[in-house]
Image (tube, rainbow, N blue to C red):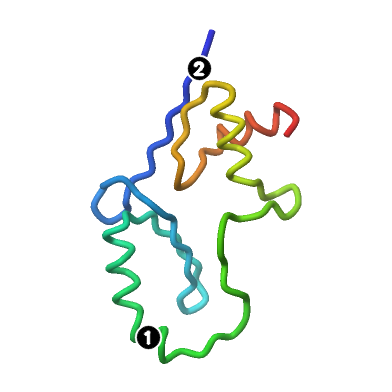
Amino acid sequence: MAQRTILIVEDDIDGSPAAETVSFILQGIEYQLDLSDKNLAKFNKALDPYLSAARRVGGRKRTGAAKPRGDSLIDNRAVRAWAESHGIEVSSRGRISADLVEQYRAAGN
């Protein structure tokens, strides 16, 4: 029996399709938001005056896709490619379901 898993990530603000997950820390608390392109632009515009006046205190600018760093993190591109090669439908952006990650790891990846 074939199974098909579909992951739809919605914008946390208005429920529209999300384009990106944004992570940030404010007053020591870490947050994540799934945002559409429109709401991501609004979010960035609202923070711009504060970020341009702020001091950077570590880390580095993140670019491109996340790279796997040990057993706890996975390469999202590899999971998506594996899923597609096994007939499992998965969104090209946003979060990957824990179920799909478990299937990927169970397959020896």
- The first of marks 1 and 2 along the sequence is 2
For residue 101, side relative to residue 8 (left or right): right
Please state which of residues 11 and 77 is positioned toward the viewer in this rendering: 77
Residue 50, numbered circle: 1
Q: SS class of the residue under badge 2?
A: loop
Residue at (61% x, 75% y) in the render: 60
Give the amino acid type for the residue marked by disc 1 in the picture: Tyr
Residue at (49% x, 72% y) in the render: 25
Measuring from the top left, give residue 15's x and y in whole percent: 26, 47
Examine the image and state in which quarter residue 64 appears. Answer: bottom right
Residue at (54% x, 8% y) in the render: 1
85 over 74 or under it: above or below: above
Q: Quadrant of the C terminus?
A: top right
How many tags in the picture? 2
Count neighbours of disc 1 (C-alpha within 10 A) and say few if under 14, some if 14 to 19, many if 20 or more. few
Residue 78, numbered circle: none
81 over 22 or under it: above or below: above
Measuring from the top left, give residue 100's x and y in whole percent: 56, 33
For residue 51, side relative to residue 81 (left or right): left
13 over 52 or under it: above or below: above
76 over 37 or under it: above or below: above
- C-alpha separation, residue under disc 1 versus residue under disc 2: 47 Å
Give the amino acid type for the residue marked by disc 2 in the picture: Gln
Q: Which residue is mark 2?
A: 3
Q: SS class of the residue under badge 1?
A: helix
Instruction: Identify the residue at the far top of this view.
Output: 1
Measuring from the top left, give residue 54's x and y in whole percent: 46, 89
Residue at (76% x, 52% y) in the render: 70
Please state which of residues 99 and 38 is positioned toward the viewer in this rendering: 38
For residue 15, side relative to residue 51 (left or right): left
Measuring from the top left, give residue 59's x and y in whole percent: 62, 76
Count neighbours of disc 2 (C-alpha within 10 A) and say few if under 14, some if 14 to 19, many if 20 or more. few
